[in-house]
Amino acid sequence: MNSAASPQPGSSPGASQGASDQRAGAVRRARPALWIAAGVLWLEGAAVLLYGVLVLLSMNKVSAGVGIGVGGMLIALGVALALVGRGVGLARQWARGPAVALQLLQLPIALGFRQSIGWLAAGLFVTAAVVLVAIFLPASTTAFTAGRRLPGDGSGGRDGAAPGRGARQ
């Protein structure tokens, strides 16, 4: 008897197919919002990367250490933004947290620039807001969480225990 063709005991053959179909449908519905967020993240990454290269090219002998450090960090941040943008565009579950964290860090930076460079502050704020809204849309949230067991989803209690067992009364 061929064990590869027979399903494992206790598993239903359609369970994994149903979960993947559910995820595919969720990603399809969220695709426009995810691509908008990814595009903005890619633009941010390209801008930061370009600025990092400009810092490296414009440093002088006196500030070489600072220039290399700042330029290197900006280049690393630009690459990170581009990679996170790729993950968001492909609806990878790992990409949502870094995307949100980077955009939330961008908001106080925008606030700091509002008096000195108003156009930069507005650009930083708008791009962060667009990415955050696109990532937290209900369709995007479903695409990022489809197929995952989440707390309180009603699929049995902790460690497979029956619902209500071990809960405080």
Image (cartoon, grey):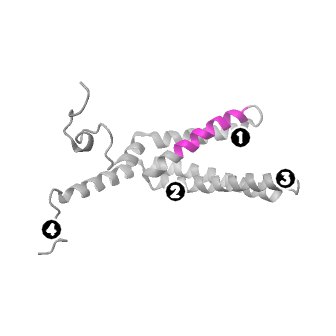
- Residue furthest to the left in view is 1
Residue 55 appears in which quarter of the rendering?
Answer: bottom right
Q: Residue at x 25, y 58 (%)?
A: 17
Which amino acid type is shown beneath numbered disc 1?
A: Leu
Around disc 3, counting alpha carbons within 10 Å, would you say few (fewer than 14), some (14 to 19), or many (20 or more)?
few
Say which residue label 2 marks.
Answer: 86
**Mark 1 element type:** helix
Q: Where is residue 96 in the image (x, y as percent from the top left)?
A: 48, 47
Say which residue label 1 marks.
Answer: 120
Find the distance from the CA under tag 3 to the CA under tag 4: 68 Å
Q: Which of marks 4 and 1 is nearer the N terminus?
A: 4
Q: Where is residue 131 in the image (x, y as percent from the top left)?
A: 54, 43
Find the distance from the CA under tag 3 to the CA under tag 1: 25 Å
Around disc 1, counting alpha carbons within 10 Å, would you say few (fewer than 14), some (14 to 19), or many (20 or more)?
some
Q: Which residue is drawn at 71% across and 56% down?
A: 72
Around disc 2, counting alpha carbons within 10 Å, would you say few (fewer than 14), some (14 to 19), or many (20 or more)?
many
Q: Does the magenta stretch include residue 103?
A: yes
Q: Position of residue 163 (x, y in %)?
A: 21, 36
Between 147 and 38, the residue placed more toward the observer is: 147
In front of the other: label 3 or label 2? Answer: 3
Find the distance from the CA under tag 1 to the CA under tag 2: 24 Å
Say which residue label 4 marks.
Answer: 6
Find the distance from the CA under tag 2 to the CA under tag 4: 38 Å
Magenta stretch in the rendered image: 99-114
**Mark 2 element type:** helix
Question: Magenta residues: mostly which secondary structure?
Answer: helix
Say which residue label 3 marks.
Answer: 63
Q: Which of marks 3 and 4 is nearer the N terminus?
A: 4
Which amino acid type is shown beneath numbered disc 2?
A: Arg
Q: Earlier in the sequence, mark 3 or mark 1?
A: 3
